[in-house]
Amino acid sequence: MKKFLLMTWIFFGLTVVASAQAQEAPYKSAILPTEYNMPKATPWRPSAADIEKAEKLIQEYLSSGQGKDAYRAETNIPLILREYQKYNRQYIGFIDENGDKNIWVVFSMGGFSQDQTIVIQVMDGGYRYFQIKVNLSQGKCYALQINGDA
């Protein structure tokens, strides 16, 4: 009986751990320090709820066909949407000159360290590297930039 109870307890414990791990984001992310300097902006550290809202707005923006002015949008945006959960992210929060809360999100399929203090900048790479800004106060995305191909 003790063996049965022990095995049941171990199985239950492993199930709880596996369930908790399944709920974690499949990508790496980092919120850059509020000391990051952006012209005409005040640094601001977004909360987990702010980031969740930004992620939702970005997915809606890309899925709705907006961002057509970005580099090769007609071919790149479907690729971005297909691979969306594979991108690592950096979040840079700032308050613009109108007092609106914004998050600049940098997406990268390349190497990543969660303790970064500088924005990832990559030349070329196509849809594997892109960035977008989200105005949380107005609930809209803008400034989508998709890297070019070499």
Image: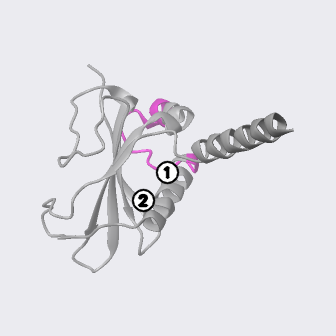
Front residue of this view, candidates 22 and 144: 22
Task: Give the residue type that dot 2 points to.
Answer: Cys
Q: Are marks 2 and 1 in contact (CB under 8 Å)?
A: yes
Q: Quadrant of residue 146?
A: top left
Q: What residue did someone put label 1 on? A: 66
- Which quadrant: the N terminus? top right
| One can see residue 92 in this view | yes
- Which quadrant: the C terminus? top left
Seen at 22% across and 32% down, the residue is 122
**Residue 64 on the magenta span:** yes
Which is in the foreground here, disc 2 or disc 1? 2
Q: Is residue 12 left or right of residue 135?
A: right
Mark 2 neighbour density, 10 Å: few (under 14) some (14–19) many (20 or more):
many
Which mark, residue 141? 2
| One can see residue 144 in this view | no
Seen at 75% across and 39% down, the residue is 6
**Residue 73 on the magenta span:** yes
**61 relative to 15, above or below:** below
What is the span of residues highlighted in magenta in the rendered image?
63-77
User: Judging from the image, what secondary structure is the residue with disc 1 in?
Assistant: loop
**40 relative to 20, above or below:** below
- As drawn, the residue found furthest toward the right would be 1
Front residue of this view, candidates 113 and 89: 113
Q: Is residue 61 left or right of residue 46?
A: right
